[in-house]
Amino acid sequence: MTVAMVSDDPVFLATLAEWSIKDHLLPWSTRLLVLTRLPLGRLNNIRRTLSMTKSILLLFTQSSTLSATLFVDLPYSPEGTQPLAVGFWSPEKGLHTTSSFLFYSKKFSMLAHRPRLVVSRVVLGTEKTITIDDPDFPGQKKIIGVNAENELIETIAKAMNFTTKFVRPADGHWGYLDSDGTWTGMIGMVHRGEADIALGLFTMTPQRHTVVDFTFPVAISYARILSARSAPEVNLWGFLLPLSTEVWVAILAALGVLMLFMMVPSCLPHQTLTRTRLLTSAYSCVRVFLQQDLIKKQDWWWWERVVLGVWMLITVVLTDSYAGNLVSLLAIRTISESIQSLQDLIDNPIQVLTVKGTAEEDAFRTATSGLKKQVWDLEKQNRLRGIPADEMEGVTEILLSSYAAIINLEVYQKKRMAKEFSRRGKCIFSLSRSRYVPSLESMAGAKNNPLIPALAHKVMQLTEGGLYNHWQSVFFPNLTVCLSAPTKIAITSALAIRNIWGMFIVLAGGYILGLAALCLECCFKGALRHNIF
């Protein structure tokens, strides 16, 4: 849409220009054509509007011959800079351009005066910062973050011809709507005009979109739970693990059936074997299973030899399989991952951490039902704590020194895991499998600021070209190492008593049963006087 404004009244032009900016009457997509006979010196009140919109100024000369000069005000022009004359019009010659600058071009694609834009950012605990000499302002220092986001904005700055000045919000927050109706953090700085760009991975939300505009998404992310990995644990009943439960049941059932089979002849009408021999044969099955020698007899029947021989073969295979697996399993330690969902946070007596001023925290704070509401209610039990974004450096020690977990965007959780892996050489954190609060992450700028569409175009080019992901891998080379860390590890050290003490419990239980049997035999000695054994 093209809007033509014709007036020689400076008050009218100034008022309309003020309303256009204050009430966003002229979005970037609208083309504005201003026709006036006022001299340039009386148009200073509207030049900011002209510079921040797709506008052309037609300044008619007050002479006998009708003619007009076409001017374009460039954005972020220094004070006192004259607008750029781009053409001339007259009834005789028509329109004649005097500059290669296109009339309705994207003025923000290449900023002519190399302005210094204020970039609001919060340095997270997962990031490294360095102080360097500012090449654009000799004698001044510049603090930059060594991360993919900083590389992204610096690359865009070179492409669009501007420099950056990083500032930190006083509260250290990303930005949320406070109870008094004001915006905090980086979002608040952009909304109040204290910063041109808010640098970071901001979650796009309808509430934030009412006060800021977002660039093309840099990433798609989710909120996940990060907690410390537990120490390797030894399974008390690990000596039972070489064989599955079904195999143990099958072995005991086979032993019982075999013992009954050995006693079948005792049920025949004319017993050919004495009862004592039958019980001895049945007991031999148990001795074979326990790898003991057989009772020496001179009159073994062939059917007994065949049955016991087959049972010996099966027992040899089972015991060798059991021994081989047991050696492997005794060298395995299990690492439990108890915190995998919001329900785990609720059920376990764990301290829950969130990042203040983030959309993820807001999703839990505004929940009216479900698990998110239950997690937020942990605040009443002093189990929920919010941490400002610029104090995230101490989160690692909190997670390692106490029973705690943090809910944050997975991209930052991965960075923390990668940073600690690079420093310690091992994975010390566990990331939950469950994901929450899916979101589009991008940079933010002032509402209806035409700089944002130009930034969005550059961001789209860089992200679709894979440069952002490349920078992530460069600055965090171990970004994915701990995502699939094993939950079982092999130990090559000597076995300790804690590794096999479950077997001693079984031994102690056998002693107790033997003692109980001894007591029973002593009590019923008279009844056992005619023992058939």
Image (cartoon, rainbow, N blue to C red):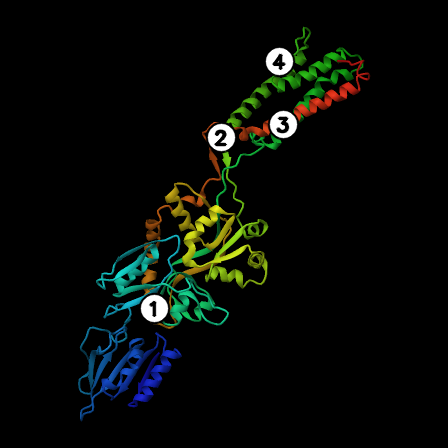
Mark 2 / mark 3, whichever is N-terminal = 2
Q: Quadrant of residue 200?
A: bottom left
Image side of residue 456 versus residue 369, left or right: left
Marks 2/3: CA–CA distance = 20 Å
The residue lying at 55 percent from left, 25 percent from top is: 322
Q: Which amino acid, mark 1?
A: Asp
* SS for dot 2: loop
- Residue 76: percent from left, percent from top: 27, 73
The residue lying at 51 percent from left, 50 percent from top is: 404
Identify the mark at residue 506; answer none if there is no mark. 3
Q: Which amino acid, mark 3?
A: Val
Marks 3/1: CA–CA distance = 72 Å
Residue behind mark 2: 331
* SS for dot 3: helix
Circle nearer the viewer, 3 or 4: 3
Mark 2 / mark 1, whichever is N-terminal = 1
Residue behind mark 1: 196
